[in-house]
């Protein structure tokens, strides 16, 4: 399905979006729509002279511009969102506007333009604190504990209902923690920043025992493309992650080691019942049996992905 197509990628200048654009430009005409609130122009600089690459600087809340951007596309990869889970505790509207309303606007533009296929980047946080770990796609009831998770679950529901009501087709990806080159937020970026400021001590939010699954961004993009090429249901939902998990203290040890630091003292905040913040899920590992059944599997485990991502982030900051 993803050869010789006209594709729109929302949020294509961001972390995951730009890696997806790199992949899709092999054999497709790709338009990126981004408002550059968090995306970076340098993430797309390699493609500036590619005649198959087009950039639209616009916001998903601009319905008129969105209509024009969607027109004539074969499929939309909807990656744009505000990904900061912690932010919802202090700004209760940001995920409503930038995730839910933005997704509604996109679906409406697709409906009126006759564009019927959408691939959407959701999140493991829709599961909340699951009683079953690793957590499969059919786990329920879904009870997110963050406003970010609630907004993504709302988007999933909108997409599913549009598919059924208007004859559309969707692929919904529930991501583990995606890390790697071009990353701009999250625990790795936070630890590197803190250790550069003070190589002797590292503040760790929560108990340090929070355990989660991590996947390299290039492997994530491989999985996204594989799902679209391999599944044909009306609404296709897939977990995407690694086959294991790693706790925050072990991540801190890997970051310190890759930075050449030893005898770093860890200072734990304790947080909210061992969490790093309100809405932080303490244990997350996704079952990936469904996507593995389609022939995709991750090459790296969580620890290996963390080490590779730290190396990439350190190279980027040294070159900047």
Image (cartoon, rainbow, N blue to C red):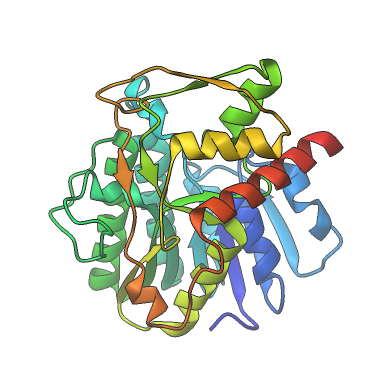
Asked if residue 167 is positioned above or below residue 198 in the image, the reply reads below
Does the rendering let one see residue 186?
no
Determine which quarter of the picture holds residue 110.
bottom left
Horizontal side of residue 266 vs 284, given as left or right: right
Tally the marks.
0
Residue located at (18% from left, 61% from top): 139
Quarter of the image with the C terminus is top right
Give whichever of 63, 267 is nearer the camera. Answer: 267
What residue lies at 28% left-to-right and 59% top-to-bottom? 134
Q: Is residue 286 visible?
A: yes
User: Residue 113 location, x and y as percent?
Assistant: 46, 67
Residue 288 appears in which quarter of the rendering? bottom left
On screen, residue 208 versus residue 197, left or right, reads: left
The front one of 34 and 85 is 85
From the top left corner, tell me how far across and down residue 91 is, in percent. Answer: 37, 22
Q: Nearer the viewer, residue 234 or 107?
A: 234
Relative to 76, does residue 3 appear above or below in the rendering? below
Q: Quadrant of residue 163?
A: bottom left
Which residue is depicted at the point 24% across and 50% down? Answer: 127
Q: Residue 128 location in percent, x, y? A: 24, 44
Instruction: Tell which residue pokes out farthest to the left in this image.
Output: 141
């Amino acid at each position: 399905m993803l050869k010789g197509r006209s594709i729109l990628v929302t949020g294509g200048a961001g972390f995951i979006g730009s890696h997806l654009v790199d992949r899709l430009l092999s054999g497709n005409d790709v338009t990126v729509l981004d408002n550059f609130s968090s995306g970076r122009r340098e993430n797309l600089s390699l493609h500036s002279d590619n005649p198959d690459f087009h950039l639209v600087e616009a916001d998903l809340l601009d319905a008129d511009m969105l209509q024009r951007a969607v027109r004539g596309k074969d499929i939309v990869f909807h990656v744009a969102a505000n990904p900061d889970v912690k932010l919802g505790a202090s700004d209760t509207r940001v995920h409503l506007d930038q995730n839910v309303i933005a997704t509604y606007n996109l679906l409406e533009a697709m409906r009126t333009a006759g564009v019927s296929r959408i691939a959407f980047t959701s999140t493991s946080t829709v599961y909340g604190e699951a009683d079953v770990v690793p957590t499969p796609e059919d786990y329920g009831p879904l009870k997110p504990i963050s406003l970010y998770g609630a907004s993504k679950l709302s988007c999933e529901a909108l997409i599913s209902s549009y598919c059924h009501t208007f004859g559309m087709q969707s692929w919904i990806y529930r991501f583990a923690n995606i890390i790697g080159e071009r990353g701009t937020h999250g625990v790795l970026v936070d630890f590197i920043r803190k250790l550069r400021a003070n190589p002797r001590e590292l503040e760790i939010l929560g108990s340090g025992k929070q355990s989660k699954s991590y996947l390299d961004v290039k492997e994530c993009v491989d999985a996204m493309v594989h799902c679209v090429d391999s599944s044909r249901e009306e609404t296709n939902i897939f977990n995407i992650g690694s086959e294991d998990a790693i706790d925050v203290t072990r991540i801190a040890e890997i970051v310190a080691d890759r930075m050449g630091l030893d005898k770093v003292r860890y200072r734990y905040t304790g947080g909210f019942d061992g969490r790093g913040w309100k809405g932080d899920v303490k244990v997350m590992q996704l079952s990936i049996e469904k996507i593995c059944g389609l022939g995709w599997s991750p090459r790296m485990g969580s620890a290996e992905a963390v080490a590779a991502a730290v190396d990439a982030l350190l190279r980027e900051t040294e070159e900047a």
